[in-house]
């Protein structure tokens, strides 16, 4: 049994579910541009319709209520609310999120709002994007406006979802929008995404001190393939860029010296200005953690390529450590090729609790893609996903029992949706979506999760 008050949630992001990319004055985002470029998205898919949540949000909230969710984590679309990323705001765009929040509250579902899940207005990318310091300031203005409009009804806020992805997949590997392969620019982007978080926290705190505000990071335990010096150095490097660069900044107000040394050939770090790190490390009410898998790495010459390769042509996101290889650790994998290792979740939770200032923790994303199909009887049977979530929830329970301040869990994702560069080929949802008809069908994992929520815990190990 989980503690009373444990948050049972599911998560989505605006670009992956909303569709309606030109409705009601929405501006163009970097992902709209990216999807329009040949070879960027598997199958040439776009999010023009996605799963039409913009028009079907009431139906989707009813699904959440049927699941028994106590909380729903969603993001707002920056170009829907502020089409050009600065200047005028769209009343219609804001009204959509007001209607969504009101619908959630009418069912007793707590809205958890994420301000940025990668859909930068194209106008801001044209002006330099995240490598430009000015984008951080524009984000703080955006955060203040959304918070002023919704802060009376939304208590829980997060700033930037997975800044590692936005910086290094967007500006180093080019796997994500805007598709640039500029390592030095990616490093600047990473800092400015952190700075945007800090400036947004300041702006929202100034408006309402009662809001609960957190940052959101995606973390991976990193294991050296062998005990060799080269493999141990590879693990240090990848852990530094993936985990410590962001955790240290948000919770300690510093960047790891070894990581800066690894990157010194790319930049003299002149973009880190006096006071930036103090701004980034503004006190948080919570830390949101996205967890999916473990990395096993090698620094040996000719090491293996990444086990979770990009779906389309791309460079390396591991700036300064492009030589590091990612090794198959021999674990079962999801359809994304991601190894399943729930023990790594406990490892990262323990590490964050022990090595950083104590702050309430929430698992804000955790889930798995599988090749789901509708059976002849109209049901979707996904026992592998049930087993995945069951194992990770058991790890969460063990973490709580060991004294780690974990207070909630959000499954990724509520519904099948547009999976970025993978298009519609990967399904993470608890709810199956027929992309032709937009019909929603609860998978067996959804029914199992609903039962878990209803009982406040796990009754028996999933089969």
Image (cartoon, rainbow, N blue to C red):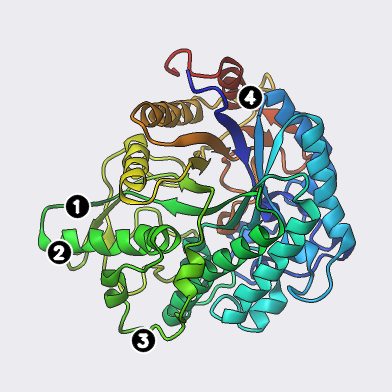
Task: Judge from the rendering whether residue 254 lies leftward or rightward of residue 109; answer left or right.
Answer: left
Secondary structure state at the residue bearing disc 3: loop
Q: CA distance from mark 1 to mark 4?
A: 41 Å
Q: What residue appears at the point 23 percent right and 62 percent down from the top-left corner?
A: 234
| Nearest to N terminus: mark 3 or mark 2 | 2
Q: What residue appears at the point 66 percent right and 84 percent down from the top-left corner?
A: 127
Q: Is residue 385 above or below residue 81?
A: above
Counting from the top left corner in percent of width and height, residue 247 is at 40, 58
Secondary structure state at the residue bearing disc 4: loop
The quarter of the picture where the C terminus appears is: top left
Q: Which residue is mark 3?
A: 268
Q: CA distance from mark 1 to mark 2?
A: 10 Å
The disc at residue 375 is 4
The disc at residue 225 is 1
Mark 3 Cα within 10 Å, few/some/many (few <14, many 20+)? few
Task: Judge from the rendering whether residue 426 lies leftward or rightward of residue 245; answer left or right.
Answer: right
Task: Judge from the rendering whether residue 412 lies leftward or rightward of residue 100; answer left or right.
Answer: left
Secondary structure state at the residue bearing disc 1: loop
Point out the frontmost of discs 1 and 4.
1
Q: CA distance from mark 1 to mark 3?
A: 32 Å
Task: Judge from the rendering whether residue 398 lies leftward or rightward of residue 51; answer left or right.
Answer: left
Counting from the top left corner in percent of width and height, residue 320 is at 32, 74
| Nearest to N terminus: mark 2 or mark 4 | 2
Q: Is residue 448 above or below residue 274?
A: above
């Amino acid at each position: 049994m989980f503690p009373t008050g444990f948050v049972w949630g599911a998560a989505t992001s605006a670009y992956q579910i909303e569709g309606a990319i030109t409705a009601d004055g929405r501006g163009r985002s970097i992902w709209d541009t990216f999807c329009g470029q040949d070879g960027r998205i598997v199958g040439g898919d776009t999010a023009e319709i996605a799963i039409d949540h913009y028009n079907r949000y009431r139906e989707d909230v009813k699904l959440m209520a049927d699941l028994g969710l106590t909380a729903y984590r969603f993001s707002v679309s920056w170009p829907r609310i502020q089409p050009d990323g600065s200047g005028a705001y769209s009343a219609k765009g804001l009204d959509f999120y007001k209607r969504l929040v009101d619908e959630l509250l009418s069912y007793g579902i707590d809205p958890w709002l994420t301000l940025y899940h990668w859909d930068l207005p194209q106008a801001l990318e044209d002006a330099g994007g995240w490598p430009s310091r000015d984008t951080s300031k524009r984000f703080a203005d955006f955060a203040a406006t959304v918070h002023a409009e919704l802060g009376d009804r939304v208590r829980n806020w997060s700033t930037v979802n997975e800044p590692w992805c936005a910086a290094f997949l967007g500006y180093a590997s080019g796997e994500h929008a805007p598709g640039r392969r500029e390592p030095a620019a990616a490093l600047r982007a990473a800092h400015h995404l952190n700075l945007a978080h800090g400036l947004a926290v300041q702006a929202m705190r100034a408006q309402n001190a009662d809001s609960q505000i957190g940052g959101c990071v995606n973390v991976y335990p990193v294991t050296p393939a062998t005990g060799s010096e080269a493999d141990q150095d590879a693990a240090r490097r990848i852990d530094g860029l993936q985990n410590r660069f962001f955790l240290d900044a948000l919770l300690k107000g510093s960047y790891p010296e070894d990581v800066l040394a690894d990157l010194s050939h790319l930049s003299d770090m002149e973009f880190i200005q006096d006071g930036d790190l103090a701004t980034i490390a503004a006190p948080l009410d919570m830390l949101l953690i996205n967890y999916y898998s473990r990395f096993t790495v090698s620094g040996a010459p000719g090491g293996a390529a990444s086990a979770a390769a990009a779906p389309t042509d791309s460079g390396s996101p591991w700036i300064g450590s492009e030589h590091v290889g990612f090794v198959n650790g021999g674990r079962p994998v999801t359809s994304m090729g991601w190894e399943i290792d729930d023990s790594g979740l406990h490892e990262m939770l323990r590490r964050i609790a022990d090595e950083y200032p104590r702050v309430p923790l929430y698992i804000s994303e955790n889930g798995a893609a599988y090749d789901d199909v509708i059976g002849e009887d109209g049901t979707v049977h996904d026992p592998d996903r049930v087993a995945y979530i069951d194992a990770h929830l058991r790890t969460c329970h063990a973490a709580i029992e060991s004294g780690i301040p974990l207070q909630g869990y959000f499954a990724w994702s509520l519904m099948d949706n547009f999976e970025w560069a993978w298009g519609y080929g990967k399904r993470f949802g608890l709810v199956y979506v027929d992309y032709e008809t937009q019909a929603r069908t609860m998978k067996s994992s959804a029914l199992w999760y609903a039962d878990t929520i209803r009982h406040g815990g796990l009754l028996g190990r999933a089969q």
